[in-house]
Amino acid sequence: MNNEQPIIVGLDIGTTKIAVIAGRKNEFGKLEILGFGKANSNGVKHGQVLNIDETIKAIRTALENCFASNPNLEVSEVYVGIAGHHIKSLQTRGDIVRQATDDEITQREIDQLISDQYKTYIPAGDQIIDVIPQEFTVDNFQNIPNPIGYGGVKVGANFHIITGDKNAIRNINRSVEKSGLHTKDLVLQPLASSSAVMAQEDLEAGVAIVDIGGGTTDLAVFYEGILKHTAVIPFAGENITNDIKTGLGVLKTQAEQMKVQFGSALANEAKANAYITIPGLRGMPAKEISVKNLANIVQARMSEILDFVTYHLKQVGLENKALNGGVVLTGGGSQLRHLIQLTEYVTGLPARIGYPNEHLAAGHIEELAKPTYSTCIGLILKGYDDYEHNRKEFEKEFRKVDVPDGLKKTNEEELLVEDDMVSAEKVRQRRGLNNFWGKFKDGIIDLFKEEEDKHL
């Protein structure tokens, strides 16, 4: 076990779930997961914290589940993801004339160039979240990815600046602090997801990362290794669930289960003669729902989200096959059936699902490689980026913590996951919160399974 590296913790405050993952890089530079916990999220809408008390409860529950998975863990600082449709981005340019022109360009000068950008004028009520250098120039030399070691009189860069609403940022920080934690840094969610599912060659080829969460769909576009564009689209998985609930006249829990189990992003692929039977409420007759109708509803909303993606690609002139890496779909919503085909049809670009196992060490439980956890794992990687480039202060002494058995893959994988859920359930009961894996939902799943056997 490599204890020469810090343990970094990612906290993903999502609209449907809150996840806490603690990780440390091993001697091969791969991420070993040392703790993992999640909880239902109630106080967040469209990626923004609206109810601070509910969000604190959910963060604490996720934290306790993380401690239940590894009692040796200590968590005080976290990297937190931020999204929501208050997020905006702008392009700026910055230059400095060097004092010591005979010496090579140093990291300190690059840091100075970046920190100057934090003084950029932005509208009142907004706050700069991140400043990302795109390409550098040294005197007359253009498009330099990293100017350290070059010599010259003037060094400059184009920057991608990400801003957010001050109140929204304050609500996140307050929720984290009142949960007994400190926010080490706020990271834009699509950038976190990108680092989890991408390798360097993807960024060089040009790629659009589309992270379909519960409340927002986050977009990051890379071209020739440079971040070209970021956007937060205010529609995602919850909108699809609400559309199903309204369109088919069912409960929200039933709508969610139908989406996950029977939902398809292509109506043409749904069986025309297949039906789902929903039990009636309190003695009401059961409802027959067409799988084809369900797919029509899902496809309509999903097409709208992908139209937004195409619109943003056009804004930066990167539609029409310019992105050789195509579209990479990640986040919980990317697991919809036939979504790859719909994405390719709407955007005209090749598509694939991005799993966050690109940088994970072997031997972790299957659950952690789901696209649902891309943001959270990406937050840890962002923390390591800070550590490796000395961007932030980290403790000098690192504690010895091993990967717990509950997070290692074994032949009894299923059994371990269930054990984990039991311990999580105990924690939740102690907290007085509803059990996330509630019997009511399980009952609906079983009912659906029975009906699926009958009809399909």
Image (cartoon, rainbow, N blue to C red):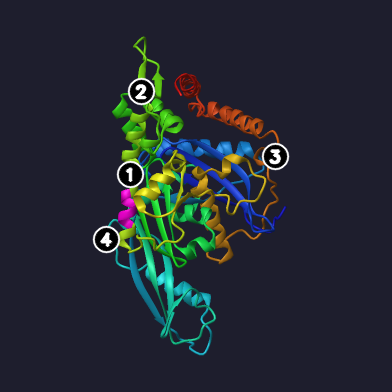
Q: Check contact, mark 3 vs mark 4: CB within 8 A.
A: no
Crowding around mark 4 (Cα neighbors within 10 Å: few <14, some 14 to 19, many 20+) is few
Give residue 289's mark.
2
Q: In this picture, is 340 found above or below 381?
A: above
Q: Amino acid at mark 4?
A: Pro
Which comes sooner in the sequence, label 2 or label 3? 2
Residues in magenta? 307-312
The reply to whether the magenta stretch includes residue 100 is: no
- The secondary structure type at the circle numbered 3 is helix
Residue at the (47%, 66%) spot, across then down = 225
Crowding around mark 1 (Cα neighbors within 10 Å: few <14, some 14 to 19, many 20+) is some
Write down the quadrant of residue 298 in the picture: top left
Which marked residue is nearer to the observer: mark 3 or mark 1? 1
- The residue that label 4 is drawn on is 123
Can residue 370 be seen in the rendering of this structure? yes
Give residue 405's mark.
3
Write down the quadrant of residue 45 in the picture: top left
- The residue that label 1 is drawn on is 303
The residue sitting at the left extreme is: 123
Q: CA distance from mark 2 to mark 3?
A: 43 Å
Near-viewer residue (279 or 128) = 279
Taking 447 as reference, is 400 left or right? right
Residue 376 point in image, percent of width and height: 51, 48
Q: Amino acid at mark 2?
A: Ile
